[in-house]
Amino acid sequence: MSEILPKITGQIIGHFNAFKGSRPAFHGEHTLIVRGISRDKIEIEEMEPKLAELEDILKAREVDVLSDAGKNFVEKVDSYIRDAESIDTAPDSGGLLRMKEQLETMGLHVEYKLFLMPYAGAFVAIWKDKSGFGPLYVEVTASEREETDNDMK
């Protein structure tokens, strides 16, 4: 695995103060998925701005998951995971939106962003109970990617 992936996930998990108890949910050759629970009291209205701060921290560019660059990243991550595990579904950027909708119907407030950097990308999802009680959950999917001229413009 690239040395950059643990660094990226560490920066993100650290930004949310979610190191304690964090664990890899998937550890592949080209992809690392880490989940954690923030120790900070982050209010619902602070979630999106806190997530947006990652663009500067990572020196990355935020992209829409439904854009061409976003779809390419999702498909690449999917191919890396499929190489390591047996999965029967097709890659689908819209699946991320459906996941958000499902979590929201369960009473959770969800925010997510996709950040692209040269040779790596990170999808970050955070959620907490809509009531405002309870912790903030953090999930980071960091993966290697091939940089193309169109991706970083």
Image (tube, grey):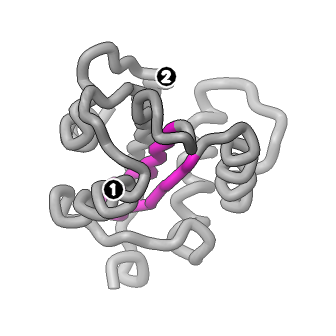
Residue 129: give x, y in percent of width and height: 55, 37
Q: Let me know if residue 77 is in the magenta part.
A: no
Q: Nearer the viewer, residue 70 or 149?
A: 70
- Name the quadrant of the N terminus: top left
* 137 relative to 88 in the view: left or right: left
Residue matched to label 1: 46
Main SS, magenta residues: strand
- Mark 1 belongs to which amino acid? Glu
Q: Let me know if residue 115 is in the magenta part.
A: yes
- Mark 2 belongs to which amino acid? Ala
* 33 relative to 55 in the view: left or right: right
Name which residue lies at 54% across and 47% down.
Answer: 77
Residue matched to label 2: 25
Q: Quadrant of residue 94?
A: bottom right
Name which residue lies at 56% across and 48% down.
Answer: 109
Residue 123: give x, y in percent of width and height: 45, 51
Magenta-tinted stretch: 109-128
Camera sees residue 82: yes
- Name the quadrant of the C terminus: bottom left
